[in-house]
Image (spheres, helix red, strand yellow):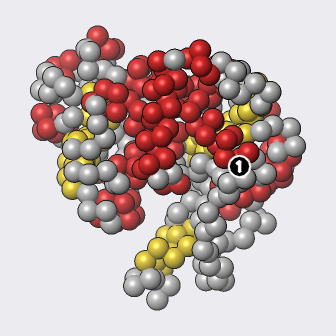
C-alpha cells in the first residue's frame, strides 16, 4: 500500500499536486466537508506532540471523517511489548489510514511494510518528518511565491533536527537553491546528509556559526529548537540550548521579503516580539500544516482505492551488516531483520533501511 515515510517518496510533480490541492482547500473549504465521510484515521503518537497530532485530527474532522488513537506510548499495547508490525496489522482491521509518531527511527517504515492501509510518518526520532516538510513547502510557496531561486538559512539543531533533514531532501530537487547552515559546531548537519543530499544534487551550501552574518542574504530563515529530548547528555544540552535567539534587532538586517519559519514548539529561540513582524510566518505555517495534511489524506486514500503500492526497496542482508544505532527500531524489536540498502557502490557504503545509519564493507 502506498504510504509516506520520507519526503522523497513523492516526486516534485506529486508535491505540486498536493500544494495545489491544499491551496484549493484553503480557498474553498466547503468543497471538502464530506470528502472523507465514513473514513477513519488512527493517530498513533508514541511520543509527545501538540501541533502534529491535533492538525492531523483537525484535518480528518474537517474532511468529514473520524479519528481514533492515543497520545502517549503508555496508552498503547507497546507498553506490554507489542511489536510495531503487530500494531500495524491490528490497526489495519479498524481504520482506513494511520499517522505514526515514534521516538525510534524506522518505526513508521516497519508499520508501512506490515499494514494493509496507508501509513503516514508523523516523525520518527531524529530521522524524518515529511508532513512537516510538506507544510514548510506550502508556506514558502504561498509566502514567497516560488520554490526555486531561493537562499534558505537553516538555524539551530541541524544534527538531530529531522525537519531540517527532510526540508533539504525536498529542496534538493528544485532549481537554484542555496543553503546556509547555521549551527554550533556540536550540532552541525550530519556528514551523510551533506554527501547524499547536498553534494549529490549539487546544491550550493555554506556552513557558519553566525546568524548575524547570514541574515542579509536570506529569502527564508528556518529556525529550529535545540531539542532536549534528543540529547543523551543534559549538560551538553544546557550549554547549547541558547545558541541562537532571533530578536527584532537581528531581524532588522533581513530583507523586507524574507520569511521566518519554525516547525514549533519554540522555547526561547525566537523572541515573542518577533511575532509582530509581518515576516514571521510560523503561525501561518501551522495553519498550512492542516491544509497540507488534508490534501495528503485525500491523496493516499484515493491511491489506496486504486490499489497503488509502495515501491519495493532493493535490500541486502549480510551477517556483517548489523545496525548498532540505539535509536533505530531494530535495537528494540529484536525479530526485525537487519536490512541495508547500497547507496554508494564505489565506496561500499550501505545504509540501514530503518534509520539510515551507515555501514561500510570493503
Q: Position of residue 85 (x, y in %)?
A: 79, 55
Q: Position of residue 124 (x, y in %)?
A: 59, 47
Q: Quadrant of residue 261?
A: top left
Q: Is residue 80 visible?
A: no
- Against 246, residue 119 (above or below) is below
Q: Position of residue 130 (x, y in %)?
A: 51, 44
Q: Position of residue 259 (x, y in %)?
A: 27, 27
Compared across the picture, whether 299 is left or right of 260 comes to right
Compared across the picture, whether 351 is left or right of 168 comes to right
- Against 136, residue 113 (above or below) is below
- Against 162, residue 22 (above or below) is above
Compared across the picture, whether 343 is left or right of 325 comes to left
Q: Is residue 123 visible?
A: yes
Q: Quadrant of residue 64?
A: top right
Residue with the most extreme bottom position: 362
Mark 1 = which residue?
Answer: 306
- Residue at 68%, 54% (x, y): give it: 308
Where, quadrant-wise, is the N terminus in this rendering? Answer: bottom right
SS class, disc 1: helix
- Residue at 34%, 32% (x, y): give it: 140
- Residue at 52%, 43% (x, y): give it: 129
**In the rendered picture of this protein, how many numbered marks are placed on residues?**
1
Compared across the picture, whether 46 is left or right of 38 comes to left
- Residue at 16%, 34% (x, y): give it: 215
Crowdedness near tag 1: few (<14), some (14–19) or many (≥20) residues, C-alpha within 10 Å: few
Amino acid at each position: 500500500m502506498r504510504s509516506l515515510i520520507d519526503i522523497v517518496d513523492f516526486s516534485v510533480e506529486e508535491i505540486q499536486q498536493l500544494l495545489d490541492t491544499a491551496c484549493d482547500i484553503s480557498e474553498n473549504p466547503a468543497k471538502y466537508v464530506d470528502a472523507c465521510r465514513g473514513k477513519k484515521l488512527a493517530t498513533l503518537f508514541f511520543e509527545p506532540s501538540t501541533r502534529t497530532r491535533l492538525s492531523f485530527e483537525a484535518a480528518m474532522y474537517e474532511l468529514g471523517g473520524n479519528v481514533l488513537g492515543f497520545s502517549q506510548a503508555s496508552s498503547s499495547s507497546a507498553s506490554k511489548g507489542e511489536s510495531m508490525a503487530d500494531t500495524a496489522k491490528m490497526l489495519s482491521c479498524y481504520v482506513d489510514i494511520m499517522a505514526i509518531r515514534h521516538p525510534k527511527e524506522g518505526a513508521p517504515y516497519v508499520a508501512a511494510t506490515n499494514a494493509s492501509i496507508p501509513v503516514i510518518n508523523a516523525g520518527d526520532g531524529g530521522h524524518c518528518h515529511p508532513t512537516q516538510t510538506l507544510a514548510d513547502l506550502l508556506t514558502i510557496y504561498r509566502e514567497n511565491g516560488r520554490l526555486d531561486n531561493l537562499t534558505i538559512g537553516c538555524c539551530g539543531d541541524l544534527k538531530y533536527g529531522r525537519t531540517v533533514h527532510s526540508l533539504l531532501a525536498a529542496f534538493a530537487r528544485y532549481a537554484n537553491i542555496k543553503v546556509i547552515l547555521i549551527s554550533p559546531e556540536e550540532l552541525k548537519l550530519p556528514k551523510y546528509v551533506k554527501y547524499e543530499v547536498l553534494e549529490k544534487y549539487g546544491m550550493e551550501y555554506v556552513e557558519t556559526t553566525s546568524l548575524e552574518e547570514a541574515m542579509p542574504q536570506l529569502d527564508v530563515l528556518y529556525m529550529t529548537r535545540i531539542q532536549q529530548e534528543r540529547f543523551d547528555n543534559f549538560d551538553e544540552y544546557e550549554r547549547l540550548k541558547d545558541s541562537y535567539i532571533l530578536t527584532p534587532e537581528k531581524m532588522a538586517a533581513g530583507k523586507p521579503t524574507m520569511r521566518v519559519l519554525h516547525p514549533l514548539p519554540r522555547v526561547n529561540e525566537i523572541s515573542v516580539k518577533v511575532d509582530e513582524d509581518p515576516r514571521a510566518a510560523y503561525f501561518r505555517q501551522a495553519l498550512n500544516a492542516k491544509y497540507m495534511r488534508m490534501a495528503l489524506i485525500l491523496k493516499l486514500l484515493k491511491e489506496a482505492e486504486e490499489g497503488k503500492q509502495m515501491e519495493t526497496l532493493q535490500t541486502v542482508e549480510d551477517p556483517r551488516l548489523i545496525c548498532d544505532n540505539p535509536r533505530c527500531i531494530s535495537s528494540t524489536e529484536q525479530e526485525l531483520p537487519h536490512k541495508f540498502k547500497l547507496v554508494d557502490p564505489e565506496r561500499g557504503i550501505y545504509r540501514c533501511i530503518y534509520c539510515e545509519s551507515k555501514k561500510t564493507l570493503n
